């Protein structure tokens, strides 16, 4: 996936490994992302990267972290990424949207699995309204970078991700939202398996090329 995005967009892609739950629950993974982003800003010229033109993105848990990174940097009034690319991001921990019932037994990720994973991530002591754990809980999304949000039709997370896109748009953030039909959670990384994955990668590449021209 990273190679495909780099080849199709012309952007340098930096893929981050971060500490995992449950051994390292929230906010460990987010702290790693914030540290890595700060490091990249400092060292970007060494790698031929424009520090003023850095995007962030991720799928599922990675989408959560990319969204939370943008929120954290906005809250601290620090320079923001030029855009955020979120593929079926996990942005809410309430599990109340209709898709959680409609696709409770969907392939690859069912509702019970997702709840268990969420519990491992947040651990103990995380407030349910902590917007850096669950970006949908933010009081405002104003001032965040433009977003490309991709969702899968057969995915319990679908409605949460699409509601996040609606909230971004309501708060004045430019958003492109695309739902891919006939596919389930995790399809985005299956570049050589699903035609919809290839289409999604192409859309991400087009989005990044547009920002390269800004």
Image (tube, grey):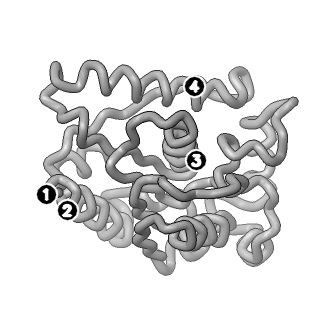
Disc 4 packing (10 Å; few <14; some 14–19; many ≥20): some
Q: Nearer the viewer, mark 3 or mark 2?
A: 2
Disc 3 packing (10 Å; few <14; some 14–19; many ≥20): many
Residues at badges 4 and 3 in contact (C-beta under 8 Å)?
Answer: no
User: In the depicted view, which residue is nearer to us: 139 or 81?
Assistant: 139
What's the distance in space between the residues labelled 2 and 1, CA to CA?
5 Å
Residues at badges 2 and 4 in contact (C-beta under 8 Å)?
Answer: no
Mark earlier in primary sequence (3, 2): 3
Please tell me whether mark 3 sits on a helix, a strand or a loop.
Answer: helix
What's the distance in space between the residues labelled 3 and 2, CA to CA?
23 Å
Mark earlier in primary sequence (3, 1): 3
Q: Nearer the viewer, mark 1 or mark 4?
A: 1
On the image, the x and y values in percent for residue 37 come to 40, 29
Mark earlier in primary sequence (1, 4): 4
Residues at badges 2 and 1 in contact (C-beta under 8 Å)?
Answer: yes
Disc 2 packing (10 Å; few <14; some 14–19; many ≥20): few
Left or right side of 136 for 3: left
Quadrant of image for the C terminus: bottom left
Residue at 75% over, 52% down: 113
Please tell me whether mark 2 sits on a helix, a strand or a loop.
Answer: helix
Where residue 31 is drawn, which disc sits there? 4
Residue at 17% over, 53% down: 212
Residue at 80% over, 47% down: 129
Residue 189 is at least partly visible in this image = no
Please tell me whether mark 1 sits on a helix, a strand or a loop.
Answer: loop
On the image, the x and y values in percent for residue 5 come to 25, 51
Residue at 58% over, 47% down: 64
Where residue 213 is drawn, which disc sits there? 1
Where residue 210 is drawn, which disc sits there? 2
Left or right side of 28 for 124: right
């Amino acid at each position: 996936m990273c190679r495909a995005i780099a080849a199709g967009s012309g952007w340098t892609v930096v893929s981050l490994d971060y500490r995992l739950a449950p051994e390292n629950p929230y906010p460990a993974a987010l702290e790693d992302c914030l540290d890595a982003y700060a490091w990249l800003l400092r060292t970007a010229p060494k790698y031929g990267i424009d520090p003023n033109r850095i995007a962030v993105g991720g799928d599922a848990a990675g989408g959560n972290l990319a969204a939370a990174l943008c929120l954290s940097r906005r809250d601290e009034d620090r320079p923001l990424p030029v855009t955020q690319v979120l593929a079926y991001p996990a942005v809410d921990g309430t599990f109340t949207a209709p898709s959680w019932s409609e696709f409770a037994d969907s392939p690859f990720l069912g509702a019970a699995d997702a709840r268990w994973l969420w519990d491992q991530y947040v651990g103990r002591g995380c407030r349910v309204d902590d917007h850096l754990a669950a970006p949908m809980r933010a009081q405002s999304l104003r001032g965040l970078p433009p977003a490309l949000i991709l969702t899968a039709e057969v995915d319990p997370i679908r409605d949460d991700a699409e509601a996040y896109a609606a909230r971004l748009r309501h708060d004045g953030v430019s958003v492109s939202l695309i739902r891919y039909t006939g596919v389930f959670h995790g399809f985005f990384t299956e570049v050589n398996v699903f035609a919809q994955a290839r289409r999604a990668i192409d859309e991400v590449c087009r989005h990044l090329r547009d920002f390269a021209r800004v």
